[in-house]
Image (spheres, helix red, strand yellow):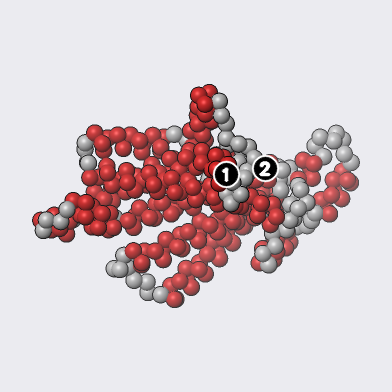
């Protein structure tokens, strides 16, 4: 078990290194840089001024040297300084990380709360009107983009209730009501979208388990249908459901870019959009690396949960 865990942890290193190289190269391929953007509104600027600015921030060095220097900073947990705001990248990220984490957790909670009960109910009521309604609900979640649903939510709140979500973020420990008033709507929009996939997976998994011999044996012994569904069917169908929900959470963490823009939530997604627009290389590279780390770490946690949820699985 220990060998397996260490091996899985070590596999994260080449994955994150590949992401770092790819992000570094792609940002340099994009036309223009932060210096050009800074002086784009200033009219004609002498080339020597632009060259001097590039030298000050190290953009005149060869790409290999820039990458090695940046990776050396990352190893020391120092992501450098933002080229646009001149603030440390860690400060820029830390002020927004909590917002994105809370929003992702709320959306995952909404998705799980909707997906598991609806998926089980659809499986138990297979081919009835209940099953059809839930399947339409799930297909709608897959078909509707979360940002479009978010726009409809804002329009409905403004038109019908003359109320719009607050624009100023308030931490949940200071004012939970004001905090949820801003974040619950993007969480509902995104959570509904991601609950659709988990609902369909839950329905399929429970249906597969309900056809097993040990379920028929439990029913033949007179076990109540509720216990059959909860103790036997649901418990033994959780592995694929947990996999889908966990991976959706990882995608969710890095996929809130458009939704944060729609609801004007100052999270990492909005920060990433602004950083790309400003060609802020260190900030973009740091945010993408964080998103990638969350994804591979969630995969690792899911793999570890397999052995806990299913005693038949052993790591060797």
Residue assigned mark 1: 179
Res 247 label:
none
Find residue 233 and report its horizontal and vertical position in percent: 24, 54
Q: Secondary structure at mark 2?
A: helix
Q: Secondary structure at mark 1?
A: helix
Name the quarter where the N terminus is drawn. bottom left
First reached walking from the N terminus: tag 1 or tag 2:
1
Residue 302 sits in quarter: bottom left
Is residue 290 shown to the viewer in this render?
Answer: yes
- The extreme top residue here reads 159
Q: Nearer the viewer, residue 30 or 228?
A: 228
Q: Residue at x 71, y 48 (%)?
A: 280
Residue assigned mark 2: 274
Residue 285 placement, left or right of 236: right
Residue 304 sits in quarter: bottom left
Can you say whether 316 is above or below 223 in the image?
below
Find residue 166 and report its horizontal and vertical position in percent: 60, 36
């Amino acid at each position: 078990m220990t060998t397996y865990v260490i091996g899985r942890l070590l596999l994260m290193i080449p994955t994150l290194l590949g992401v770092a190289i790819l992000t570094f190269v792609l940002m340099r391929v994009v036309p223009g840089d932060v210096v050009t953007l800074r002086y784009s509104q200033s009219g004609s600027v002498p080339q020597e001024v632009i060259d001097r600015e590039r030298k000050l921030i190290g953009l005149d060095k060869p790409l290999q040297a820039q990458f090695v220097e940046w990776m050396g900073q990352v190893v020391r947990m120092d992501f450098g300084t933002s080229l646009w705001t001149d603030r440390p990248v860690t400060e820029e990220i830390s002020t927004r990380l909590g917002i994105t984490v809370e929003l992702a957790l709320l959306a995952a909670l909404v998705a799980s709360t909707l997906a598991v009960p609806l998926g089980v109910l659809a499986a138990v009521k297979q081919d009835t009107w209940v099953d059809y309604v839930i399947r339409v609900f799930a297909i709608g979640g897959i078909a509707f983009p979360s940002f479009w649903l978010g726009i409809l939510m804002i329009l409905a709140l403004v038109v019908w209730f003359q109320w719009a979500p607050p624009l100023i973020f308030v931490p949940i420990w200071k004012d939970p009501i004001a905090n949820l008033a801003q974040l619950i709507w993007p969480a509902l929009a995104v959570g509904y979208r991601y609950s659709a996939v988990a609902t369909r997976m839950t329905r399929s998994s429970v249906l597969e388990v309900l056809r097993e011999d040990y379920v028929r044996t439990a029913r033949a012994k007179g076990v109540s249908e509720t216990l059959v569904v909860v103790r036997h069917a649901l418990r033994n169908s959780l592995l694929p459901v947990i996999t889908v929900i966990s991976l959706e959470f990882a995608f969710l963490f890095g996929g809130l870019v458009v939704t944060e823009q729609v609801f004007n939530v100052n999270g990492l997604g909005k920060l990433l959009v602004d950083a790309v627009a400003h060609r802020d290389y260190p900030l973009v590279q740091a945010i993408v690396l964080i998103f990638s780390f969350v994804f591979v770490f969630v995969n690792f946690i899911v793999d570890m949960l397999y052995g806990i949820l299913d005693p038949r699985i052993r790591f060797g």
